[in-house]
Image (cartoon, rainbow, N blue to C red):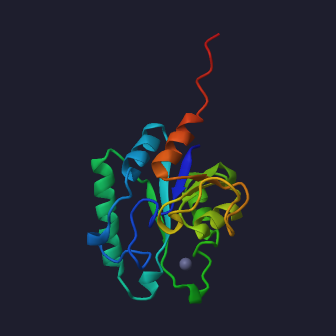
């Protein structure tokens, strides 16, 4: 079972000054990100997005606009030969204290259930600390990409505060996917 759970804002797409995007027009892929997803797909991976979208709960945009953002994301992925299997999101602002807002583990538990996977089989990939903390809560393997909210973080040395132990760091999604696919064991030799 190969399942990668990606963060959206800052990992797949660039983010504005506000740290989020509120319209389909504002959606712009991170360099190399779409091609990286296509590489994962070709290697047999399911790729799922899990994202906090508190702007919904705050009324900064509505579900129609969120659907338009995701329609554009799917179109641009398809044009690059890539596919996202599903998008799971939390619509709540922090003060609602829901269980689905990352770093809470509920979204990831739903994804594991949908795909019939155990938490430790999930690879959790993202640029924001809360995404990785949610992954840690379900026992996933953790990968930080230093784009978006983590742009400029060093990829070696001591782990920055807040990152769960065992988190591996990469400059961006493309570099991570190269490393991840390079780890795939070669086929067993013929007897
Ligand atoms: Zn929620």
Q: Quadrant of the N terminus?
A: top right
Residue at left offset 32%, top offset 63%: 28
Residue at left offset 58%, top offset 74%: 100
Q: Position of residue 83 (x, y in %)?
A: 38, 50
Q: Position of residue 76 (x, y in %)?
A: 29, 55
Is 94 drawn above or below residue 78 in the view shown? below
Q: How many marks?
A: 0
Q: Position of residue 167 (x, y in %)?
A: 67, 56
Is 159 drawn above or below residue 191 in the view shown? below
Q: Nearer the viewer, residue 179 or 158?
A: 158
Q: Nearer the viewer, residue 15 or 1?
A: 15
Furthest residue toward right? 165
Residue at left offset 36%, top offset 47%: 82
Q: Position of residue 168 (x, y in %)?
A: 64, 52
Residue at left offset 42%, top offset 82%: 56
Q: Quadrant of the C terminus?
A: top right
Q: Quadrant of ligand 1?
A: bottom right
Dividing the picture into quadrants, the one containing residue 129 is: bottom right
- Is residue 6 left or right of 118 when viewed as pictured? left
């Amino acid at each position: 079972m190969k399942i990668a759970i990606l963060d959206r804002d800052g990992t797949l797409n660039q983010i504005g000054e506000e740290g989020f995007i509120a319209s389909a027009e504002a959606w712009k892929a991170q360099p190399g990100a779409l091609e990286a997803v296509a590489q994962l797909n070709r290697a047999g991976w399911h790729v799922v997005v899990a994202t906090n979208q508190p702007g919904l709960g705050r009324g900064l945009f509505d579900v129609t606009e969120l659907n338009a953002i995701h329609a554009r994301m799917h179109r641009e992925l398809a044009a690059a030969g890539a596919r996202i299997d599903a998008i799971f999101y939390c619509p709540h602002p922090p003060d609602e204290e829901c269980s689905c807002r990352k770093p809470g583990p509920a979204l990831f538990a739903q994804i594991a259930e949908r795909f019939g996977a155990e938490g430790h089989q999930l690879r959790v990939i993202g640029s924001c600390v809360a995404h990785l903390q949610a992954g840690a809560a379900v026992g996933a393997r953790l990968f930080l990409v230093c784009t978006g909210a983590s742009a400029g973080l060093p990829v070696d040395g001591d782990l920055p505060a807040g990152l769960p132990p065992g988190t591996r760091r990469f400059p961006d999604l493309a570099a991570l996917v190269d490393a991840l696919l390079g780890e795939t064991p070669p086929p067993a030799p013929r007897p």
